[in-house]
Amino acid sequence: MRVTAEKSENGEESTVSVEGRFDYRVYDSFKSTYSSLPENSKQINVDLSETDYMDSSALGMLLMLREHVGRAVNIMLVHPRPEVMRVLTIANFDKLFSIRT
């Protein structure tokens, strides 16, 4: 379980990556990671390509991220694995977030 962030040079686009299990155990690191993103971000990508498990607490954390940055910032969930995509679809997160497979 690891959460990392990368920022573009101009700070307008950031990527938060979650590796391993995306569950309650990464709450603190996920929150501190998105809280440290630049204020002028226009796009936040949440890279789920290395996420092999997601539960309801992860869904809650994604909603907290959206609340934290506001609706003016686009949040894109990128490259979810099939098992993670299934969780997102069942929870109707494909209607709340942009998802790029």
Image: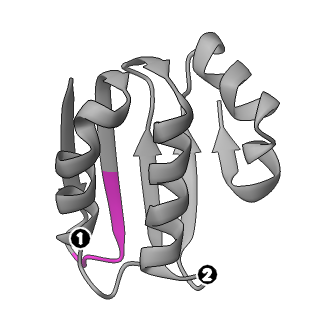
Mark 2 sits on what residue?
A: 71
- The reply, left or right, for residue 78 in relation to residue 38 is right
In percent of width and height, residue 8 lies at: 25, 65
Helix, strand, or loop for circle 1?
Answer: helix
- Quadrant showing the N terminus: top left
Q: Taking 93 as reference, is 53 left or right?
A: left
> Of the residues shown, which amino acid type is indicated by label 1?
Ser
Give residue 69's position: percent from left, percent from top: 44, 78
Does residue 31 appear anywhere in the picture? yes
Stretch in magenta: 10-15
Q: Is residue 65 or residue 6 the one in the foreground?
A: 65
Q: Is residue 28 left or right of residue 81?
A: left
Helix, strand or loop at mark 2: loop
Query: Residue 3's x, y, as percent?
Result: 21, 39
Q: Residue beneath label 1, please? A: 35
Residue type at tag 2? Arg
Q: Quadrant of the C terminus?
A: top right
- Residue at 19%, 50% in the rendered image: 28
